[in-house]
Structures are given as structure tokens and as C-alpha cells.
């Protein structure tokens, strides 16, 4: 077995899955197949009032029960979601979108296909998480840059220095305090706003 394939199987074995499905032959088949793969599985029916906080994968039957009360919990806990549907109808498609499914199993359930959809859902959820982290870091970077630009403009206007000098002043203060430059900029902007509200003026002079 190749290293990438082993990594995928190891990830599946670490999964903590909740199966929301009728306690019938198909529900038992799905739970047994997941347990054979080595992961921790719990079967719940009818759909629980809330999702257990420790699950990271959700297999959910969408045709036979009301599930929409779980949508806020799915949005909050962000598990990998595998939707289970009996028909490819417009209603089923809408339900698949509503739960933000990462994989789909169609009924009648068979052991074949479970592994593929399970692995695909886990991969897609992981990819979404990595993408969200990158977006959050980019947003923080852009927020910091905007704060620096605003602080530079304030220092230029209030201290009668050029932009390069104002930038160096912020950079030197950040270096001396061993904090990010954006933190110093945010402090300058917050101080200016607070003092302006009192009719006062901020002046940050360069060290001599």
C-alpha cells in the first residue's frame, strides 16, 4: 500500500462518525461497514435534537425525517457530511445543498461505495478547512495593512512628517516593543479616535 493511501485509511480510522438513519437493515449495514473500516460510529434515530460535540463526520438520511433543526449545529461544528437519499428529486437536491454535503450515498445502500464517499467527504471537509484558514489569514493581513495605512495618514497629518518617516516611526515602535506593526498602528488609530472624542490631539514624536 502506498503512503498516500495509508494516510487516507489512517484518517478514516480516526473518524468519529454519527449515522442518522432508521434502525433497519440498511442502517445496520452502514454502521457495520464503517466499523469494519476501524472508525468510531454511533447510530441515532430519530434525528437527535442536537449533534454530539465530539463527532467529525455525519452520515444523515434526508428523505424520511425532519433534519432542518440540525442545520445550525452542522454550520457550527462543521463535520464532514455524507447525505443519504433515496431519490434524485429536486427536493433531495435541495436537501443535499442545505446540509452542505461533501458526499452522497443513494439507496438502497450497499457496502460498495461507502469507503469512496467517506474518504471523499473527509478530504473535501479538510480542504474547506484549509481554504478557510488561508482566507482568514489573508483577511487579517489586509486588515493589518489598512490599519497601517490609516495610522501613517494620521501621523502625516498630525506630525507634519512625510509618509516614509511615518512608516519608519511605526516600524521602529513595533520593533522596540516586539509586537506586530499592525498592533502599533491599531493603537495609534484607537488613541486618535479616543482623544478626538475629547477634543484632544495625538502627537507621536520620533526618538532623538
Image (cartoon, rainbow, N blue to C red):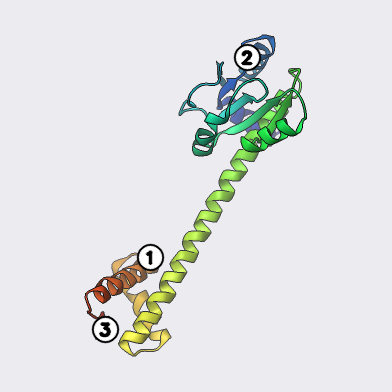
Crowd rating for badge 1 (residues with CA inside 10 Å; few <14, some 14–19, many 20+): some
Which picture quadrant has residue 56? top right
What residue is shown with label 2? 22
In x, y percent, where is residue 44?
Answer: 55, 17
Crowd rating for badge 2 (residues with CA inside 10 Å; few <14, some 14–19, many 20+): some
| Residue toward you, 125 or 84 | 84
> Residue, x 47% and y 28% (percent of image)?
54
Which picture quadrant has residue 36? top right
| Residue toward you, 146 or 208 | 146
| Residue toward you, 76 or 199 | 199
In x, y percent, where is residue 89?
Answer: 77, 30
Label 3 and label 2: CA atoms lie apart by 71 Å
Q: Quadrant of the C terminus?
A: bottom left
Label 2 and label 1: CA atoms lie apart by 54 Å
User: CB atoms at circles 2 and 1 under 8 Å apart?
Assistant: no
Q: Is residue 3 visible?
A: no
Foreground tag (3 vs 2): 2
Depicted 143 relative to depicted 91: above or below: below
> Residue, x 65% and y 32% (percent of image)?
8
Crowd rating for badge 3 (residues with CA inside 10 Å; few <14, some 14–19, many 20+): few
Q: Quadrant of the N terminus?
A: top right
Label 3 and label 1: CA atoms lie apart by 19 Å
What residue is shown with label 1? 180
Q: Find residue 205 and name its label.
A: 3
Depicted 83 relative to depicted 30: above or below: below
Disc with the residue nearer the chain's start (3 vs 1): 1
Amino acid at each position: 500500500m502506498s503512503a498516500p493511501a495509508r494516510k487516507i485509511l489512517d484518517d478514516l480510522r480516526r473518524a468519529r462518525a454519527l449515522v442518522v438513519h432508521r434502525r433497519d437493515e440498511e442502517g445496520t449495514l452502514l454502521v457495520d461497514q464503517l466499523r469494519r473500516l476501524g472508525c468510531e460510529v454511533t447510530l441515532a434515530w430519530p434525528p437527535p435534537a442536537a449533534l454530539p460535540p465530539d463527532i467529525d463526520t455525519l452520515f444523515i438520511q434526508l428523505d424520511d425525517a425532519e433534519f432542518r433543526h440540525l442545520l445550525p449545529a452542522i454550520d457550527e461544528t462543521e463535520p464532514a457530511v455524507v447525505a443519504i437519499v433515496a431519490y434524485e428529486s429536486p427536493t433531495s437536491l435541495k436537501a443535499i445543498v442545505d446540509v452542505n454535503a461533501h458526499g452522497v450515498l443513494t439507496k438502497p445502500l450497499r457496502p460498495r461505495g461507502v469507503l469512496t464517499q467517506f474518504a471523499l467527504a473527509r478530504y473535501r471537509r479538510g480542504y474547506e478547512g484549509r481554504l478557510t484558514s488561508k482566507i482568514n489569514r489573508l483577511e487579517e493581513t489586509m486588515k493589518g495593512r489598512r490599519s497601517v495605512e490609516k495610522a501613517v495618514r494620521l501621523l502625516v497629518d498630525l506630525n507634519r512628517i512625510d509618509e516614509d518617516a511615518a512608516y519608519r516611526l511605526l516600524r521602529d515602535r513595533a520593533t522596540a516593543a516586539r509586537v506586530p506593526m499592525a498592533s502599533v498602528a491599531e493603537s495609534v488609530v484607537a488613541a486618535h479616535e479616543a482623544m478626538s472624542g475629547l477634543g484632544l490631539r495625538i502627537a507621536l514624536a520620533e526618538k532623538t
